[in-house]
Structure formats: structure tokens, C-alpha cells
Image: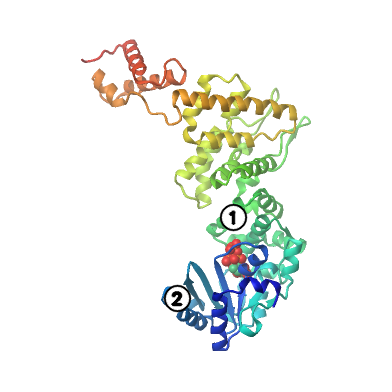
């Protein structure tokens, strides 16, 4: 038995092995589950390959497990699934697959274990562990997956041009595994991705996005984005992000490379937060820089209003990416729009009213915004970084102080529009809005406290100056 075989010495695997023996079938655990055993990662889906029909083995396994097991048979695909104690066991007969150029749908025939393993994506995913009793725990590793796990390599078992043209999604998977596991993609494998990048076009956006989501959830998402850029996939799947790359120079003055700056900000955020939408915000915060870039003889490079234009670009990007067009999108939009505010604040004097306005606009997302802004300070000039961080500390202190005093974060107008209409006998009109806004502004400017009595008094003053008087 291979050392790793000891890790599967549990009832489930012995039951499957016994059933396979009774039916006279070879049966192996394959793919991600075997890889994850070596990596000590926990996985709940277990894939089995049998030589001959997998459906019969699954049916018999479900019977053995008894009433607590659920069996699902997918006859058209020749696969079957058994759910038992929260674990999913997937059974399939070993296959030989060949693919047509224009489709991911393979032509499938019965094959040997090696036929099956050789058509898998990477050597680390092409290992099998036998569960038949006389070979229980024996590792089949024809392509040196164990060696590649030790070396930290993503490599295809066959000629990579065949592996990727069989299924172009694997190009994304290679980059996703390289990011998740912090592995290197073998040179020949990477060159083949570069050669075949265009083929990503036959893959649905949803599947590409699933991989991007996994890249974004990794410890250092920048690894994936940089690889995507290097192999040419990025400009095909996310042209707006690819456009951030590069430095233009006029009269010897260049701006910073916004792609690498963005990746730095992204990793900074990822180091502090698992919130995947905050990570997307970091990736998108400067997305409008390419379209707003101007050279100004006096100032140099400018990206005027890139935060506002960037926020406007978000819905289209989300639509193209097949992301949800819901409150997550609004959150990203809002933070992209506000991402300059805390910095603008510390560059001037940190006044109470500016802090109140920031709290009002950011609401409950203020902490995420501050985290993003901190992450956005990537200057190489230590003096500048020190100064900004110091001022940031002042902003944070003031945010707490003012929130305690004025409760602006979830601002509710102390006098409602309905009340204003009732008091002055107004129908819904511009005046009502003006009075309401003037109260809000007075609170944010610190002219009055965020209290009802003060607000009512201020309302009467404002209305009076507009020539209105109460009807009672
Ligand atoms: N596989 C493949 N090509 C693909 C997808 C999957 O060859 N495009 C094979 C690999 O052997 C993989 C196995 O099918 O290990 C199971 O695939 P899947 O469940 O999608 O992925 P895992 O490798 O288990 O990894 P993860 O759960 O992280 O997605």
C-alpha cells in the first residue's frame, strides 16, 4: 500500500471496494480527491472510475449503504451518484474520449484506466488509488503527479496542445490551480496556453467566471491575473482590465503602470479581507483610468473623474461577466465611486464636516472603504506613505468620534418629508425636498446637532426664508 493509502482506510472506501470485487470490476478513486489527500485539503466529492460500467457499482454501493443513501443515475452520461452522510460519491466507467474542434462535447467510448487518466487535465489530477481489496490503497501515478506536487508544478499528462484543445476551459483551470496552490505552470504547458488562448471563445462566460471567482478567493489573487495577462487570455476575457497595462511617456514623464498598481491593491485587500466583492472592488477601482487618461502640459498625467466614470462602467462589466446585478453590484459601484474620498480628505485639513459627509455617503460600508483606501497607498516613497498613513489614523479617530456623537452612518432624517408637508400645508413639491436637504446639510456641516428639536427649529427658519409659514 502507498503511504497515502492509509488515509482512505475507512468504511466507505472498503464498502465500495467490496462491491467492486463482487461485481468483478477494477475500481479507483481519481482526480481532485487523490490530489487533495496529498495536499491535506478536505474534499467532500469523491470521484470513482471503474473499468466497465460505473452505474452498476453505484447501484450496488447505494444498496449496501441502505436507506440513508440516495442514488442518482445519469444514463445518457454513463454516470451515477450516491449521496451518503453528506458526502457525494460519483461513479463513471473508464473512458476514452476524443473531441471535435468546435465543441467541448466529447465522443466517448469505453476505455482502460490509463486511457481515462491520460485524458485528464493535469498530472496532479491524473492519479488513481485502487479500492479493490487485494490492491487497496495502491497508487497509480503514470504521469508523476506525486513528483509534480512536490515540485509545485502544473503540467499536462499528454502533449498540452491536445489537452487544451480537448477542453479549452483547462487553460483557465491551469491558472486557477497555479493561483490556489501557488504552483508554477510548466513552461511547455504555459506556452501551449499562449498558443491556444483564442480557443477560450467556445467556453461559456459562466464557466470562465467560476474560475475567476476561485482565483479571487485565493490568498494572492494577483498570481492568476498576472498569468492571464502574460498568456494573452486576459484581453479576450476581460479587455477593460487588460487596457490598464502599460506606461505611456510624454516629455520623459511616465505614469505608473495601472495594471500592476491594481494587482498590488488587490493583494493588499486580500491580505486583510475575505470579502470577495471587496476584492472585486479593488480590482475595478481604477478601471476607468485608460479612458480618462490625459496629458496636461502643466500638471502632467491626469485621470480626471476616473472614479465616477469607473462606477458608471460597472453595470456593463457585471452584465458581460454574468455577475449578479443586485446589491453586490451596487456595493462595488459605490466603493469605486468613493475610493478617492478619504485620500482627498487627508490631503486637505481633516474637517468634521468632511468626515460627516464621508460617513453619510459610505454608510455601513465605511470600514470597507477605509480598508480599500489603505490598500491603495502603494507609493514607493516611504516619506509620502508615512504622511498619508498618519493622516489616515486621524481620519479613523474622527470617524469613530463623530459617529458616536452624530450617528451619521445610518442617517435617518430627523424630520420626514410628510411632516414638512403637513406643517406647511404643502403637496409633494420641490420646496419639500429643499427644506429636507437643508436640514441634512446643516447636520452634516455641523451647524446643528443630529437631533429632532434642533432640526425642527432649523426647518422653521429655512421655511420662513422661503416665504412659507406653518398652517397651524
Ligand atoms: N477534469 C479534467 N478537465 C476538466 C475538468 C476536470 O480533466 N476540464 C478532471 C480532473 O482529473 C479533475 C476531475 O476531473 O481532478 C474532477 O474535476 P472537478 O471536480 O471539476 O475539479 P477538481 O480537480 O476536483 O478540483 P476543484 O474541486 O478544486 O474544482
What residue is rendered at 57% in x and 69% in y? Answer: 104
The residue that disc 1 covers is 214
Contact (Cβ within 8 Å) of mark 2 with mark 1 = no
The C terminus: image quadrant:
top left
Reading the image, the residue beneath label 2 is 71
Confirm whether residue 195 shows in the render: yes
* Picture layout, residue 321 above or below residue 4: above
**Quarter of the image that includes the N terminus:** bottom right
Q: Is ligand 1 closer than 8 angstroms to the Cβ of mark 1?
A: yes
The vertical placement of 411 against 69, above or below, is above
The quadrant holding residue 301 is top right
Provide residue 140's location: percent of width, then percent of height: 69, 77
Give left or right: position of 171 versus 56: right
Ligand 1 closer than 8 Å to label 2 CB: no
215 or 402: which is nearer to us? 402
Vertical order, 311 against 419 (above or below): below
The residue located at (59%, 78%) in the rendering is 49
Apparent side of residue 121 relative to residue 66 in the rendered image (left or right): right
Left/right of residue 109 with respect to residue 356 in the rendered view? right
Q: Quadrant of residue 277?
A: top right
Q: Earlier in the sequence, mark 2 or mark 1?
A: 2
Amino acid at each position: 500500500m502507498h503511504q497515502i493509502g492509509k488515509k482512505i482506510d475507512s468504511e466507505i472506501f472498503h464498502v465500495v471496494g467490496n462491491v467492486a470485487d463482487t461485481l468483478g470490476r477494477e475500481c479507483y478513486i481519481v482526480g481532485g480527491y487523490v490530489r487533495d489527500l496529498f495536499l491535506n485539503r478536505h474534499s467532500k466529492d469523491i470521484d470513482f472510475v471503474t473499468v466497465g460500467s460505473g452505474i452498476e457499482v453505484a447501484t450496488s454501493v447505494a444498496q449496501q449503504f441502505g436507506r440513508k443513501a440516495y442514488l442518482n443515475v445519469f444514463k445518457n452520461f454513463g454516470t451515477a451518484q450516491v449521496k451518503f452522510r453528506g458526502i457525494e460519491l460519483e461513479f463513471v466507467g473508464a473512458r476514452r474520449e476524443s473531441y471535435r474542434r468546435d465543441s467541448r462535447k466529447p465522443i466517448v467510448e469505453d476505455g482502460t484506466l490509463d486511457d481515462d487518466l491520460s485524458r485528464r487535465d493535469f498530472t496532479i489530477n491524473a492519479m488513481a488509488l485502487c479500492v479493490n481489496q487485494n490492491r487497496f490503497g495502491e497508487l497509480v501515478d503514470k504521469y508523476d503527479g506525486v513528483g509534480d506536487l512536490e515540485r509545485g508544478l502544473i503540467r499536462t499528462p499528454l502533449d498540452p496542445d491536445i489537452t487544451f484543445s480537448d477542453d479549452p476551459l483547462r487553460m483557465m483551470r491551469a491558472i486557477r490551480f497555479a493561483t490556489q496552490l501557488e504552483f508554477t505552470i510548466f513552461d511547455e504547458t504555459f506556452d501551449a496556453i499562449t498558443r491556444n488562448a483564442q480557443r477560450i471563445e467556445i467556453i461559456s462566460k459562466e464557466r470562465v467566471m467560476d474560475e475567476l471567482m476561485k482565483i479571487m478567493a485565493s490568498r494572492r489573487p494577483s498570481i492568476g491575473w498576472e498569468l492571464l495577462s502574460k498568456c494573452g487570455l486576459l484581453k479576450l476575457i476581460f479587455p477593460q482590465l487588460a487596457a490598464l497595462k502599460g506606461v505611456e511617456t510624454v516629455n520623459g514623464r511616465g505614469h505608473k503602470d495601472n495594471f500592476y498598481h491594481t494587482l498590488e491593491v488587490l493583494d493588499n485587500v486580500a491580505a486583510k479581507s475575505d470579502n470577495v466583492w471587496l476584492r472585486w472592488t479593488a480590482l475595478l477601482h481604477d478601471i476607468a483610468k485608460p479612458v480618462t487618461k490625459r496629458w496636461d502640459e502643466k500638471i502632467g498625467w491626469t485621470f480626471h473623474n476616473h472614479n465616477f466614470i469607473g462606477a458608471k462602467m460597472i453595470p456593463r462589466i457585471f452584465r458581460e461577466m454574468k455577475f449578479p446585478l443586485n446589491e453586490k453590484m451596487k456595493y462595488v459601484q459605490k466603493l469605486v465611486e468613493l475610493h478617492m474620498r478619504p485620500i482627498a480628505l487627508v490631503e486637505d485639513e481633516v474637517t468634521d464636516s468632511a468626515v460627516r459627509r464621508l460617513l453619510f455617503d459610505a454608510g455601513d460600508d465605511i470600514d470597507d472603504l477605509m480598508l480599500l483606501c489603505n490598500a491603495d497607498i502603494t507609493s514607493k516613497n516611504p516619506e509620502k506613505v508615512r504622511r498619508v498613513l498618519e493622516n489616515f489614523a486621524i481620519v479613523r479617530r474622527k470617524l469613530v468620534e463623530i459617529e458616536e456623537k452624530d450617528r451619521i452612518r445610518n442617517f435617518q432624517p430627523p424630520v420626514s418629508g410628510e411632516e414638512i408637508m403637513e406643517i406647511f400645508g404643502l403637496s409633494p413639491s420641490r420646496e419639500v425636498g429643499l427644506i429636507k436637504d437643508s436640514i441634512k446639510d446643516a447636520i452634516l456641516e455641523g451647524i446643528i446637532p443630529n437631533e429632532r428639536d434642533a432640526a425642527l427649529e432649523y426647518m422653521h427658519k429655512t421655511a420662513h426664508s422661503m416665504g412659507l409659514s406653518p398652517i397651524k
